[in-house]
Amino acid sequence: MVAYFIVYQNVTDPKQYQAYFIAVAPLIQRHGGRLLGQGTPEVMEGTMPWERVVLLEWRSQQDFLNFWHSEEYAEIRKLREGATEWQAAIVKGIEQGSQ
């Protein structure tokens, strides 16, 4: 079952964040993830303290966890430190017909 990783962020160092993004994108793909959307959210109700949202899809929650806890990502994650303030969550997808 697919899983979605949702990131809410404020980028504080665009140059450093770009270095992180360039490094992490191929690793995400190798671990079964794909970028579905990113950008400034259009808030429909309430308030959004985040300037940017990123949505990624993974083949499974386990594929995401393998990525998240990998030694490769531990190194790349260091590039993100100090470049962005963020909150993130993972949620399981809904199987077709079980809605």
Image (cartoon, grey):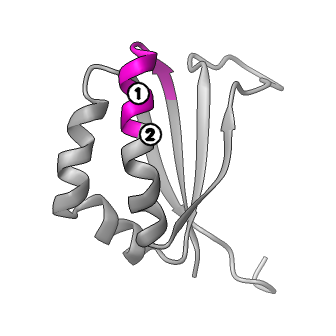
Which span of residues is magenta-colored? 9-20
Q: Is residue 15 in the magenta section?
A: yes
State which quadrant residue 78 falls in: top left
Q: Residue at x 41, y 71 (%)?
A: 31
| Label pair 1/2, CB-CB below 8 angstroms | yes
Q: Position of residue 61 (x, y in %)?
A: 44, 72
Identify the secondary structure beneath mark 2: helix
Q: Which residue is mark 1?
A: 17
Identify the secondary structure beneath mark 1: helix
Q: Position of residue 57 (x, y in %)?
A: 59, 63
Amino acid carrying label 1: it is: Tyr
In the rendered view, would you say 15 is above or below 1? above
Out of 66 and 27, give the one closest to the viewer.
Answer: 27
Horizontal arrangement in the rendering, residue 83 relative to residue 8 (left or right) = left
Horizontal arrangement in the rendering, residue 48 relative to residue 73 (left or right) = right
In the rendered view, would you say 65 is above or below 45? below
Q: Residue at x 21, y 59 (%)?
A: 72
Q: Which residue is mark 2?
A: 21
Q: Is residue 39 in the magenta section?
A: no
Q: Position of residue 25 (x, y in %)?
A: 46, 52
Q: Where the C terminus falls, by quadrant?
A: bottom right
Amino acid carrying label 2: it is: Phe
